[in-house]
Image: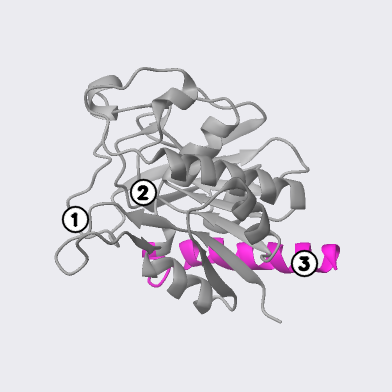
Amino acid sequence: MKPIIGVSGTQLLNPGRGFEGTLVAYTPQNYIDTVQGVGATPIMLPVGTAEDAKNMVALIDALILTGGHDVNPALYGEEPHRNLTGIFPKRDAFDFALYAAAIEKGIPVLGVCRGLQIINVYHGGSLYQDLPAQYGDELLLHVQKAPFDIPMHSISVQTESRLYEAVGAHTRVNTFHHQAIKQLGNDLKAVAHSVDGIVEAIESADPNIDMIALQWHPEIMATTDTANNRLFEDLVARAAKAKLKLS
């Protein structure tokens, strides 16, 4: 059987015309297409309880924590900045539970954008709540106005990392995030930075945790960029290995 990749879902909290009064559970189609394209079966994991998260993780061979809402700053002991945008505390708790269950089961995890941020906060780290207001004048453009499949800025990657094996020492990435890692969490290592110093990728310093997380959106670039597609091929290979080990 193909590896089964769980893709964390979210909710459309303010649905438009045609969905009035009805919450919509979804995950972006790019994740589905990319996972299928690298030979795995994706399933969406809709937001639920901690018990739901554990039951869902029992069914999958790898986990993708997707992008979306700002992380609630109360989780890292801060008051809300004036430029904080929409938060979804129930999703924060669910993503924490998914990640914890994946670690406990011993399956690989890929975090994307918010996924990187939620992993960092889970490990005791903190975030810039709004980069333009909090980081400084040297900040690059991190919310691109070009189409999202166009790479906008460069990153430098540490050679001793899983990320280096996929994308090499330097690559260009797309970017649309106004939050980022401020204090790195415990047992994490930053393995890529943009030229302004923003952390663009992290991995676990604990050899027992198979995790890589990215501040950009590789799922949008994967169909046109070999390096970004390799990140999903690598996830599937790691999932197959974990599946064999757990069988």
Marks 1/2: CA–CA distance? 19 Å
**Residue 55: x %, y % from top left:** 67, 58
Say the numbered circle drawn on residue 243: 3
Contact, mark 3 vs mark 1 (Cβ under 8 Å): no
Please report whichever mark, 1 or 2, sits nearer to the chain's N-terminal start: 2
> Which amino acid, by three-letter code, is at mark 3?
Lys
**In the image, residue 236 lies in the stretch drawn in magenta:** yes
- Quarter containing the C terminus: bottom right
Q: Which residue is mark 2?
A: 68
Q: Which residue is mark 1?
A: 146
Marks 3/1: CA–CA distance? 39 Å
Of residues 191 and 42, the one drawn nearer to the viewer in this rendering: 42
**In the image, residue 81 lies in the stretch drawn in magenta:** no
**Given the current orientation, which residue lies at the most extreme bottom position?**
1
**Given the current orientation, which residue lies at the most extreme front position?**
21
Residue 71 visible in the current orientation = yes
Above or below: residue 198 compared with residue 52: above
Above or below: residue 85 compared with residue 149: above
Under circle 1, the secondary element is loop
State the predominant SS element of the stretch in magenta: helix
Under circle 2, the secondary element is loop
**Residue 98: x %, y % from top left:** 60, 49
> Which amino acid, by three-letter code, is at mark 2?
Gly
Under circle 3, the secondary element is helix
Of residues 47 and 185, the one drawn nearer to the viewer in this rendering: 47
